Image (cartoon, rainbow, N blue to C red):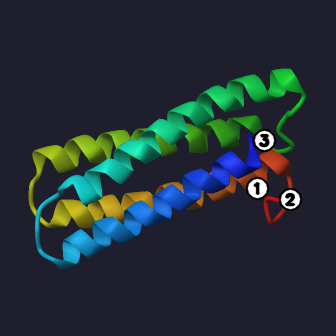
Amino acid sequence: MIHWYAVITMIVSFIGAVLSLGVFTTKRGPNDFSILPVVATAVLLVVQVIIMIVAPLTGNPAEGDMLEIWMYMIVAVALPIGTGIWALVDKTKWANLVLSVMQLAVLVMTWRMLVLWFGTPSGF
């Protein structure tokens, strides 16, 4: 896992959560402001999967439990894909709230993976 890349993923997730919550407060259905950050988060996480496969081979092994890290990663990748598809089908304002909560969940899971990868309480 690359520290700066995980931080970028967390920043994009936070921005996506704020944008989705903002669209939710306007009582509109999902639009570009709430869907595009979900797509960006999904792409960042898929690239993170590739990084997590290559990193141990290049001398950056995980300090924590690999099973736990990969379980977090699988769920983190599945969340934006699943909720993104669901938001495209459900055009109510509530889809934006779900997207916002999902983005916050991905942020927390990315932080936890970072902590597990480096084996320190702060993740640094």
- Along the line of sight, the residue nearer the viewer: 2 or 73: 2
Q: Are marks 3 and 1 in contact (CB under 8 Å)?
A: no
CB under 8 Å between discs 2 and 3: no
Indicate which disc, 2 or 3, sits on the residue closer to the N terminus.
3
Judged from the image, the secondary structure of the residue bearing numbered disc 1 is helix
Q: Residue at x 78, y 45 (%)?
A: 117
Res. 1 image quadrant:
top right
Real-space Cα distance between discs 2 and 3? 12 Å
- x, y percent for residue 81: 35, 39
- Residue beneath the point at 70% across and 24% down: 53
- The percent position of residue 115, horizontal first and vertical second, equals 76, 55
Which quadrant of the figure has residue 11?
A: bottom right
Mark 2 and mark 1 residues within 8 Å of each other at the beta carbon: yes
The residue closer to the viewer here, 32 or 119, is: 32
Which amino acid is tagged 2? Thr
Residue at image mark 3: 65
Q: Residue at x 52, y 40 (%)?
A: 44
The label shown at residue 115 is 1
Residue at 12% in and 74% down: 27
Could you tell whether 12 is left or right of 119 in the image? left
